[in-house]
Image (cartoon, helix red, strand yellow):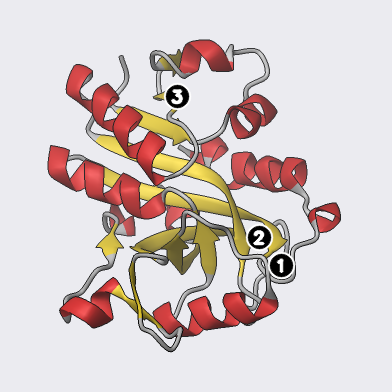
């Protein structure tokens, strides 16, 4: 067992990077990739990802977890499809309350607490990885499908990208005392939903080149 676990959410993302390894196997137990790191598929969404990652960390002793995957970039984030970012902080974007007039207040607004989950300092990374652009993420259960919601979420959380697992990864790793990092490649712009514009294979290829090849 290596000291670093690279955690994927979906089997699709995993298969694009490691077609020679069974995603079914990686979803049941970590698999070593050489002598540098192990890989695992932990499931899509905060619930599945956090449950499966917690199970892995309860069985295996890792010093750090590096979560990798795709993301949607908000329209005003100055990011393009294929760009790779290091998400250093993440927040649950659709947790909160809705008032009778339809206004949404985030959980941070309701409680007055800082609800951002943060990763480890990039100073412990290799120089190529530490040099990747830092970004703020929003973890959601329901992905953005309109430009209005994209602008609302990005403004509310001062966020650059949208994910479905980032905050969960940070929270679980903190509980287990394990360092955590999150790297994402932009596969689409989070705006009016049009899957024909998504570039998932290209995004994962960029992620492999910028992150996994530099571990």
Give coordinates of residue 61: x percent, y percent: 19, 23
Residue reaching furthest to the right = 196
* 132 vs 59: above or below: below
Give coordinates of residue 108: x percent, y percent: 25, 76
At a point 60% along the width and 75% down the height, the residue shown is 150
Whether residue 182 is visible to the viewer of this picture, yes or no, is: yes
* Label 2–label 1 contact, CB within 8 A: yes
The circle on residue 80 is 1
Give coordinates of residue 91: x percent, y percent: 35, 65
At a point 61% along the width and 45% down the height, the residue shown is 207
Quadrant housing the N terminus: top left
Which residue is disc 2 drawn over?
83
The circle on residue 39 is 3
Seen from the viewer's position, the closer of residues 45 and 177 is 45
At a point 42% along the width and 32% down the height, the residue shown is 6
The earlier-in-sequence mark between 3 and 1 is 3
Helix, strand or loop for disc 2: loop
* Label 3–label 1 contact, CB within 8 A: no
* Label 2–label 3 contact, CB within 8 A: no
Seen from the viewer's position, the closer of residues 125 and 169 is 169
Seen from the viewer's position, the closer of residues 188 and 214 is 188
Helix, strand or loop for disc 3: strand
């Amino acid at each position: 067992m290596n000291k670093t676990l690279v955690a994927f959410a979906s089997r699709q993302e995993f298969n694009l990077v490691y077609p020679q390894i069974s995603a079914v196997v990686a979803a049941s137990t970590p698999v070593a990739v050489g002598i540098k790191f192990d890989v695992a598929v932990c499931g899509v969404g905060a619930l599945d990802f956090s449950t499966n990652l917690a199970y892995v960390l309860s069985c295996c002793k890792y010093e750090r977890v590096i979560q990798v995957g795709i993301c949607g970039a908000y329209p005003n984030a100055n990011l393009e499809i294929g760009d790779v970012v290091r998400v250093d902080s993440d927040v649950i974007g659709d947790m909160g309350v809705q008032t009778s007039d339809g206004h949404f207040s985030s959980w941070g607004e309701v409680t007055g607490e800082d609800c951002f989950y943060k990763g480890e300092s990039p100073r412990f990374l290799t120089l190529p990885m530490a040099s990747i652009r830092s970004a703020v993420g929003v973890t959601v259960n329901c992905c953005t499908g309109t430009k209005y919601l994209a602008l609302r979420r990005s403004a509310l959380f001062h966020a650059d990208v949208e994910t479905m697992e980032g905050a969960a990864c940070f929270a679980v790793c903190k509980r287990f005392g394990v360092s955590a990092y999150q790297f994402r490649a932009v596969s689409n712009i989070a705006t009016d939903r049009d899957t024909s514009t998504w570039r998932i294979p290209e995004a994962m290829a960029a992620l492999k080149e910028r992150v996994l090849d530099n571990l």
